[in-house]
Amino acid sequence: MTETKKLGFGLMRLPRKMLMTDVDQVKEMVDLFMKEGFTYFDTAFIYVGSEASIKKALVDRYPRESYTLATKLNAFLLAPNEKAAKKQFTTSLERTGAGYFDYYLLHALMENNYKKYEKFHIWEFVKEQKEKGLIKNVGFSFHGGPQLLDQLLREHPEVDFVQLQINYADWENPSVTSRANYETARKYGKKIVIMEPVKGGRLANPPKEVQALFKAYHPDMSCASWAIRFAASLDGVLTVLSGMSNVEQMQDNLSYMKDFKPLNDEEQTIIREAQKILGRSSAIACTACHYCTEGCPKHIPIPEIFAAMNKYLGNGQKEEAVSAYQSAASTGHRASDCISCHQCENACPQHLPITQHLHECAEVLEEQDKNS
C-alpha cells in the first residue's frame, strides 16, 4: 500500500437525510476522496450508523487493499462489563464487513476512564486480535494531559500510533494541551493521527477578525484550509482527520490537500496572530461530539444549546442566538432543566465546565427568549 496522504475522512459527522445517514451522498464523497488517492477512513463503534454506512459506501464497492479503515472500542460509554466491551470488536467487524482493521483504537482515553480499559483487559484483547491478523496497527485516541500520555506510552510500547486532538486554537490551551501531548508522542516516536483539526467546525467559521486575517493573505482559501494545513504541517503526522458532512466540504478539503504544501513562514506568522485573537474569545469551546448527551438524565441537547449561545458570545447576534436556542429546545428539553449531576463533564473530551455553561445559557437565552 502506498504512503498515506495527509487527509483522512472522519466518519463521525456524516450527512443526514431526515434521521438516517444519507448513504448516496456518502458514496459520492467516498468516490471523490478515493479518486484523488486518499485512503484513510476513520469510524467508531459508538458513531451511530457510521460503520454500517461505510460498508455500503466503501467496503462493498472498493477492493480491500485499496483503502485503510480505522475504528474504535469504547469501554466506558456503552460497555457495562468486560464481555460487552470486547463484543464491540466483533460487532464492528460484522457492521463494516472489512475482514480486518488497518488501525484499531481504544477510544477517548483520559484521566477518568483509562483504568476501565485495564480493568476489562482491553490492552491484552487487542494485542490478541493483532496476533490473529484482525488488526494491523493498535493505537488509542486521547483526551487527557501529557503526564497520562507519557505513562500510557511508557507502559504500552506495543502501541503503533496515537490519535490526538490538535488544532491551532488549542495548541497552548491548558485544558486540551495540544502542544504538550504532541511533543510527548513524538518523544516516543509514535505516528500521530490528528483529530479535531477544525475544532468541530468552529475553525471553519472563526471570529470575523481571524477571517479577515486569513482572507487578506489568501482571498480564495477557506478558513478550514488554514486549520487543516496547520495540523498536517507538523512532523510525524500520519494523517489529519476531517469530519466532512457534505460533498462541498469534501471538495474544499481536496482542493488544497491533494497537492499538500506545508505552511510557509509567513503563514505560520499569521497562524500565531490568529491564536492571539482566539485567546481573547469568550465562545464556548464545544466541538459537538455529543459524548455529553449520552447519559444526560434530562436529555438536554447540550451542543446545540452551546452553538446557539456562541452566536451571542462570538458575534453578538442576540436574535439569531435566541432563534437557534428555540430550535434546540423545541423538543422540550432546555438549559434550565440541568440538575447539576455533572455526568456530562466526566464524558467531555474538552473538559468544559458544562454545568456552569448551561446555567449561563439558561440565564441569558431563556431571558432573551422571554423578552423577544
Image (cartoon, rainbow, N blue to C red):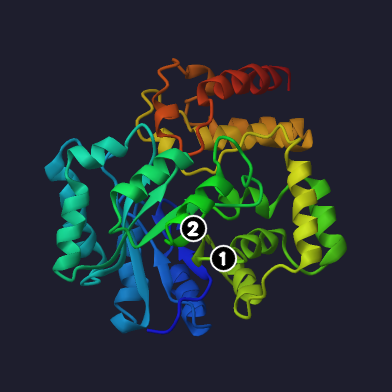
Which residue is labeled 2 in the image? 186
Farthest residue, direction right: 216
**Picture coordinates of residue 41 (x, y %)?**
41, 68
Cα separation between marks 2 and 1: 9 Å
Tag 1, which secondary structure?
loop
Within 10 Å of the Cα at label 1, are there few (<14), some (14-19), or many (20+) other Cα atoms? Answer: few
| Mark sitting on residue 303 | none
- The one nearer the camera, 329 or 101, is 101
**Picture coordinates of residue 63 (x, y %)?**
31, 84
Residue 326 position by quadrant: top right
Image point (75%, 69%), residue name: 264
Q: Amino acid at mark 1?
A: Asp
**Picture coordinates of residue 169 (x, y %)?**
66, 47
Residue 305 position by quadrant: top right
**Picture coordinates of residue 345 (x, y %)?**
45, 28
Within 10 Å of the Cα at label 2, are there few (<14), some (14-19), or many (20+) other Cα atoms? Answer: some
Q: How many numbered marks appear?
A: 2
Q: Is residue 246 left or right of residue 342?
A: right
Q: Is residue 158 left or right of residue 296?
A: left
Q: Is residue 12 visible?
A: no
Q: Is residue 352 left or right of residue 141?
A: right
Q: Quadrant of the N terminus?
A: bottom left
Tag 2, which secondary structure?
helix
The answer to the question of whether label 2 and label 1 lie on touching residues, with beta carbons closer than 8 A, is yes
- The one nearer the camera, 191 or 13, is 191
Q: Earlier in the sequence, mark 2 or mark 1?
A: 2
Which residue is labeled 1 in the image? 235
